[in-house]
Image: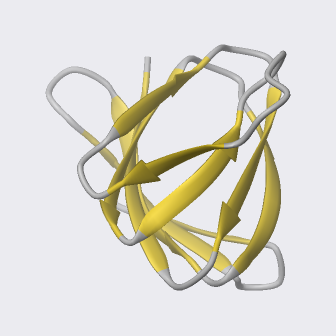
Amino acid sequence: MFKTNDYFDGKVKSIAFETVDCPATIGVMAKGEYVFGTSTIEHMTVTSGRMDVKLPGETQWKTYKEFETFIVPKGVKFDVKVESDTSYRCLYK
């Protein structure tokens, strides 16, 4: 049914599920800085709060607010900072 994931000593939690088109997760991040790795292309949408993101090859952070989406390539690492509890949805394509 659903799979729960726990990362960074419980500061990031998600629930995995299947959409009609692809696997997905919904999750929350506590205030902090994180480095994530990808094994597929990820379409990440902020659903509450805001995320500062530095994608591979970028030198500056970009802020994503509620209902804004960014796409992360397969096989890379990317940096995320959140200043307060923030929720997201991620589609794995």
Spot occupied by residue 24 in the image (x, y as percentages of width and height): 37, 41
Q: Is residue 89 above or below residue 81?
A: above
Spot occupied by residue 75 in the image (x, y as percentages of width and height): 79, 17
Q: Residue at x 36, y 35 (%)?
A: 69
Rendered image coloring scheme: secondary structure
Spot occupied by residue 60 in the image (x, y as percentages of width and height): 77, 35
Taking depth in this image into account, of 22 and 31 the one nearest to the observer is 31
* Residue 60 in sight: yes
* Residue 1 in sight: no
Tell me which corner region of the image, top left, top right, bottom left or bottom right, holds residue 72. Answer: top right
Judge left or right: residue 73 versus residue 25. Answer: right
Q: Is residue 91 above or below residue 57?
A: below
Q: Is residue 69 above or below residue 46?
A: above
Taking depth in this image into account, of 52 and 87 the one nearest to the observer is 52
Q: Quadrant of the C terminus?
A: top left
Q: Quadrant of the N terminus?
A: bottom left
Q: Residue at x 45, y 48 (%)?
A: 64
Judge left or right: residue 42 versus residue 69. Answer: right
Q: Is residue 66 above or below residue 14?
A: above
Total count of labels: 0
Spot occupied by residue 70 in the image (x, y as percentages of width and height): 46, 30
Residue ranking furthest to the left: 20
Judge left or right: residue 8 versus residue 18. Answer: right
Taking depth in this image into account, of 30 and 21 the one nearest to the observer is 30
Q: Residue at x 80, y 61 (%)?
A: 34
Q: Residue at x 50, y 66 (%)?
A: 14
Judge left or right: residue 12 versus residue 64. Answer: right
Tell me which corner region of the image, top left, top right, bottom left or bottom right, holds residue 50. Answer: bottom left
